Image (cartoon, rainbow, N blue to C red):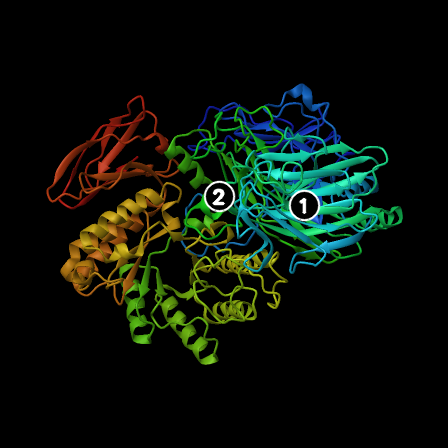
Amino acid sequence: MLISRSLLAFGLALNLSAPMVNATDWLLDGEPFPAALTVNKDTEEIALSNGLIRRTFKISPNAATVGFDNLATGEAILRGVKPEAQVTIDGLDYAIGGLAGQPNYAFLRPEWIASLTAQPDAFQYVGYEVGDIEARMDWDPVRHHAPDVTWPPKGVHLRMDYRMPGVDGDKAIAATATSELGRKTLLTDSFTALDVAWATHATSGHPRSSFTNEGKVGEIYTPENTHVHVERPLPAGTALVEVTLNLGTDRSSSWGPGLALVWPERVIKFNLRPGGGSFGLWDGTEERVDLGTLGPLELGKAWSLRMRREGRTLFCEARVGSAPWQTITSVELPEGLGTPDSVRLGKMDIRGGDEDHQASGGLVRLAFEHFAAYGEIDETALAADADAASAKKQIGVSVHYELYDGIPALSKWITVTNNSPQQIVVNRFTSEILAAVEDGSAVETPAYGLTHPNIHVETDYAFSSFNAEDANDHVVHWNPDPDYKTQVNYQRTTPCLLEVSPEIGPEKALAPGEVFTTFRTFMLPHDSYDRDRQGLALRRLYRTIAPWVTENPLMMHARFADWEQVKLAIDQCSEVGFEMVILTFGSGFNIEDDSDDYLAKMKGYADYAHEKGVELGGYSLLASRSVSVADDVVMPEGQSPTFGNSPCLESAWGQDYFRKLYQFYEKTGFNLLEHDGSYPGDVCTSTTHPGHKGLNDSRWNQYQRIAEFYRWCRGQGIYLNVPDYYYLAGSSKCGMGYRETNWSLPRAEQVMHTRQNIYDGSREKIPSMGWMFVPLTEYHGGGEAATIEPLDEHLDHYERMMMSNLALGVQACYRGPRLFDTARTKDMVQRSVAWFKEYRDILESDLVHGRRADGRDVDWMLHVNPGLEHKGMLVVFNPLTEGVTRTLKPNLYYTGLADTATVRQERGAPQEYTLNRDYTIDIKVTVPAEGFTWLVIE
């Protein structure tokens, strides 16, 4: 429940005392670090802090983050003030909050803050509410999970509310943001064909030079420093011209693409100079290249240039994508100069004419996509636009923050509420804008790129990867900051501006009364560059915000789906302690069969499994297949689906597919879905699919379709194996990291790959988050040398594979028709499972990395959990063909032990060790040939 805090009640505060500085390491004990909101009435600031991080907001004259501090290191994370977010509604870009006037973006001095001013065209802060964190989805914890997790997480939820700017702000926007506001559209051309009014001027220096390349009007193909442009007369009364183009491969400077206004005795050209990383202007007498930039030219995005005449001033403005227009420069026109006769678009010489440079360069390709001409501002039309904007005054935006107890992490998202009497469209949004202190600086931009600040950032809008950073690459952007003009980097390309925004969409229509909620962004500032410590911090984050990832059932992948084979698998799992049977791919299981007979048959399967104490699940392939021409994604020209083929989730087929999934789990009682080839983020340009209108809303709507289903599964206690980073949307497991064909290698090599994959994959993942593989029968080939069956004949290898997974807390997919074929095979599996369950909590705890498997000597890792009775377990493997004794030096710091540790090897007698000053112990360990041992630490 939220507690209201408005501007009128500003003097009241929730928990006025900030958490005390505490020497306790939060990774060992998070209790001393509760989250709280504090208020400073004198400075008109509020702050979220838990003693590990603190985010401070100035709330007058508008709201903005003016401090973000890593209290563990004493370092500032923030170097500059930006808007809290940005939204585009009905084509207009609005900043949410923010303060202007910071003189230097390299740092933020406290005395500057009081003089910062509000922007009139930004959403204005009106108040806040604070309360407990509420669950973002239901979780039914029906199976074993980590004993120390809670849901929802404990902490503080802060909501800051903003209102639409006033009419004056809208008029300011109308003058500079959207060209057609208050103006009559005189001419538009999207270059689907070349209008006869355009006259083409092209160099004679190359036979391919043209404004129409391979039938594509507007595409220029010509040597780099040559001229190719089109020209046409302008309608009477033209006061603004605008062009949108894509730079393609053009890297020219003075011959860079742009537009020019032409009078009988004067040409004024405004162009992009990709070769110089700037803008250029021929003002009629000289070329100017000392113009400000919007940062590095983003060559893969559409740029828009416009020239806008107001009285005798000609404003030259630019933007990338749908970002706000910015005035780059202006030209004072001579007295008496009338309206221009014509406009030129394309590549021109320095003076906007038809000459070529002596060094023409290689061939380049670029495209002009749209042109428009508009008249003077019509005050009546502008007033109508202002009236329409006034009807939207009830649109509200709220920015939400959650700060968690015991971990230096917070989340952030925004909501847009349409309380106006008309439909609106949320075209785009940026939910986090953070001018962070750079991680490093270099005068020259290194070829390998600069590192971004030491902050982990991810969202619950992630897909198409086993890795968090790659899965969020489309939405988490570390960009150069155009306001940071004093940075060391000569081209000002230091990646220190965090902008969290989808590449496309959402293009979400909101009816009156509807609320739009963005995805959530999770931020974890690191307090160290140590790789293990960063991994431990990230894994603590997952336990906090997605505790279902600690569910880790022992699972068998049943090779066949006929009743006798399924019954055998269920019975064997029940006998040896396995907890789940999955009707795997290629088994004959068909989740898309929605006939009454099939659903009743599957319910019988599930009922029998439950009687035996075993959960039952099945496999379904979503993407990575073609359904039909009508239902597959229609990709933009030149793009292909991620997996080669994919249906659109918002096609008629896609909507029916999810109907079948809901129905299957509601009617059968199955407990798991292995969802292979999950939605990878493919866009779709179709305008006939019922669930989206076109390209711009296709990714958002498809993702919502699958994420809603996954959240529903989480609330129903349905376990999700998804080979993509869908953890924050409800999935529990994806691959630990492996190449499928490796399971066709000789058996001894498979064992090595198993431990290598786990060692590497558990850098970011809790052991329970990643699956491995044990091919009981032949998988992708390899014959007898790669196969465990007959199981009894390869019992030693079978046990090595089981313990290589179980001793590291990882569950593998045991794929085959049976788990045992003889009494001694059954005994081995039973013993291994019983041992795992005896020590399950510590085995599923975090791993500190020791020595990676390489087949040359022992490899080992250390499980740690200071909250358990067994605070650590050292697991050691010997790949050699003879027994060895080694002295190892594990670091016990993350066990929470400080002075002494009691250690016993397997069931042996305990022995006390004194910790060295660096928290290590020197321990002698004997491991049998091709064997394994374990040591409990208390």
The image position of residue 811, as x and y in percent, is 33, 53
Considering depth in this image, is 169 or 419 the residue closer to the camera? 169
The image position of residue 576, as x and y in percent, is 27, 60
Circle 2 residue: 362
In which quarter of the view is residue 588 placed? bottom left
Mark 1 Cα-neighbour bin, 10 Å: few <14, some 14–19, many ≥20: many
Visible in this render: residue 2?
A: no
Mark 1 vs 2, N-terminal side:
1
* Left or right of 709, for residue 130: right
Circle 1 residue: 87
* Left or right of 334, for residue 665: left
In what quadrant of the picture does the N terminus appear? Answer: top right
Q: Residue furthest right?
A: 380
Real-space CA distance between mark 1 and mark 2, rounded to the nearest whole angstrom: 40 Å
Q: Residue at x 48, y 30 (%)?
A: 445
Q: Secondary structure at mark 2?
A: loop
